[in-house]
Image (cartoon, rainbow, N blue to C red):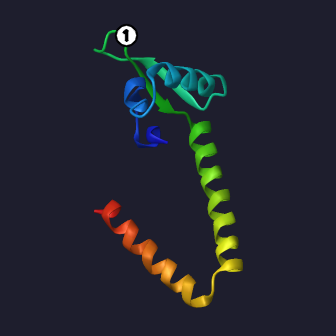
Amino acid sequence: MRCRNGTMTTSDLAADQRPQSMARAVGLLMEQNLVTRRAHPTGGRKSLVKLSDAGRSALEAGRGSRAGWLAQANEAELTEEEGVLLARSTALLDRPTTR
């Protein structure tokens, strides 16, 4: 989710979607108290969206459960050599995002 990096406008969130679709999604997330929305200080009709504490917790819980499932699947399906190769590959993939 793009919003995890801070406050964003709805149009920034909708970079790959129709703005109407994103507005509907943000509305549903607000109903579940997963995001907050406030008026943009200088943007006229724009609004700013931010993950709420509950939204951040839900995002982290989902990420944790997916990571746990993936670790179990890797352990069950990969040979030891493949596991080592995967760990090395993951480190390489992470490198550009940690600079």
Q: Is residue 44 left or right of residue 33?
A: left
Q: Which quadrant holds residue 27? A: top right
User: Where's the C terminus, which quadrant?
Assistant: bottom left
Identified at 32% across, 9% down, the residue is 44
Identified at 45% across, 37% down, the residue is 3
| Residue 18 image point, x, y percent | 45, 24
* Nearer to the camera, 35 or 80: 80
Identified at 45% across, 72% down, the residue is 90
Q: Is residue 78 left or right of residue 15?
A: right
| Residue 12 image point, x, y percent | 37, 30
* Nearer to the camera, 67 or 56: 67
Identified at 34% across, 60% down, the residue is 97
Q: Residues within 10 Å of mark 1 (few under 14, many from 20)?
A: few
The single residue placed furthest to the bottom in the displayed view is 81
Figure check: 34 above or below 59:
above
How many numbered markers are drawn? 1
Figure check: 13 above or below 75:
above
The single residue placed furthest to the top in the displayed view is 44
What residue type is disc 1 on? Arg
* Nearer to the camera, 3 or 23: 23
Figure check: 19 above or below 58:
above
Which residue in the structure is indicated by mark 1? Answer: 45
| Residue 21 image point, x, y percent | 52, 23
Secondary structure of the residue carrying numbered label 1 = loop
Q: Which quadrant holds residue 71? A: bottom right
Q: Is residue 42 left or right of residue 91?
A: left
| Residue 95 image point, x, y percent | 34, 68
